[in-house]
Image: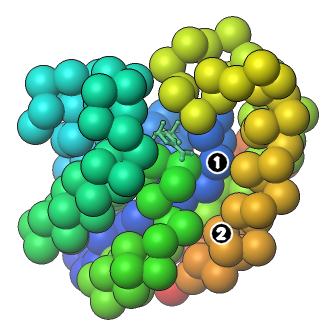
Amino acid sequence: EMQAQLKKTVVLVGMMGAGKTAVGKALAQVLSVPFRDSDSAIEEAANMSIAEIFARDGEPFFRRKESQVIERLLEAPPSVLSTGGGAYMSADNRKLITGKGIAVWLDVELPLLWSRVRHKDTRPLLRTPDPHATLRELYAARVPVYARADVTVKARPHFSVEDMAVKVRNA
Ligand code: S3P
């Protein structure tokens, strides 16, 4: 069953700190397809970090680049594609993803997300006077949208990449 060819790109969506990149790499291995990451693709094309892009060109510019990169990566043969936490908030992006991929939400609860992102300085959206409150607000606003994904994978007790592979194959 695991040998069957993947027909659609598996698009991982979810909050900052959900583990989209780590889980995506493992899932790509199990599915024997390439791993791609929209944030990395944007950074490579711009030759700047995400934080630098936000600081220099602003979030709207970043979001345009993000949509272009997602569209381009969805043209390629099926892969596992990890997206930035805000990517699935765009109706245009959701339409692209639904057409060519399977959206998989990595559903992780707020305390665990916070414990993972609190010591990092790489996320421009959390450079606020109260990053914990900002994360909480983003979480509350975004969860109802992530919940529209084709597949939801709950974090507890931990992601089983094999279970996920079966779920996305059956989706
Ligand atoms: C963002 C999440 C980041 C990155 C950018 C914006 C967001 O990706 O795309 O900082 O809007 O949640 P990760 O989810 O990989 O941290």
Disc 1 residue type? Met
Expressed as whole percent of the image width and height from the top left, the position of residue 166 reads 53, 70
User: Can residue 100 be seen here?
Assistant: yes
Q: Quadrant of residue 50?
A: top left
* Ligand 1 lies under 8 Å from the Cβ of mark 1: yes
Expressed as whole percent of the image width and height from the top left, the position of residue 54 reads 38, 33
2 and 120: which one is in front?
A: 120
Quick one: SS at disc 1? loop
Residue carrying label 1: 15
Q: Residue at x 22, y 32 (%)?
A: 43
Which comes sooner in the sequence, label 1 or label 2?
Answer: 1
Do residues under tags 1 and 2 come within 8 Å of each other at their CB atoms? yes
Disc 2 residue type? Tyr
Expressed as whole percent of the image width and height from the top left, the position of residue 47 reads 12, 24
Q: How many marks?
A: 2
Q: Quadrant of residue 121?
A: top right
* Ligand 1 lies under 8 Å from the Cβ of mark 2: no
Instruction: Kindly identify which numbered label has been placed on residue 169.
Output: none
Q: Residue at x 32, y 22 (%)?
A: 52
Badge 2: how crowded within 10 Å, few (<14), some, or many (20+)?
many
Q: CA distance from mark 1 to mark 2?
A: 9 Å
Left/right of residue 121 with respect to residue 119 in the rendered view: left
Badge 1: how crowded within 10 Å, few (<14), some, or many (20+)?
many
Residue carrying label 2: 146
Q: Is residue 10 above or below residue 25?
A: below
Query: What colour-coding does the image apply?
Result: rainbow
Quadrant of image for the N terminus? bottom left
Q: Residue at x 82, y 24 (%)?
A: 130
126 and 38: which one is in front?
A: 126
Q: Is residue 13 above or below residue 132?
A: below
Quick one: SS at disc 2? helix
Q: Residue at x 77, y 26 (%)?
A: 131
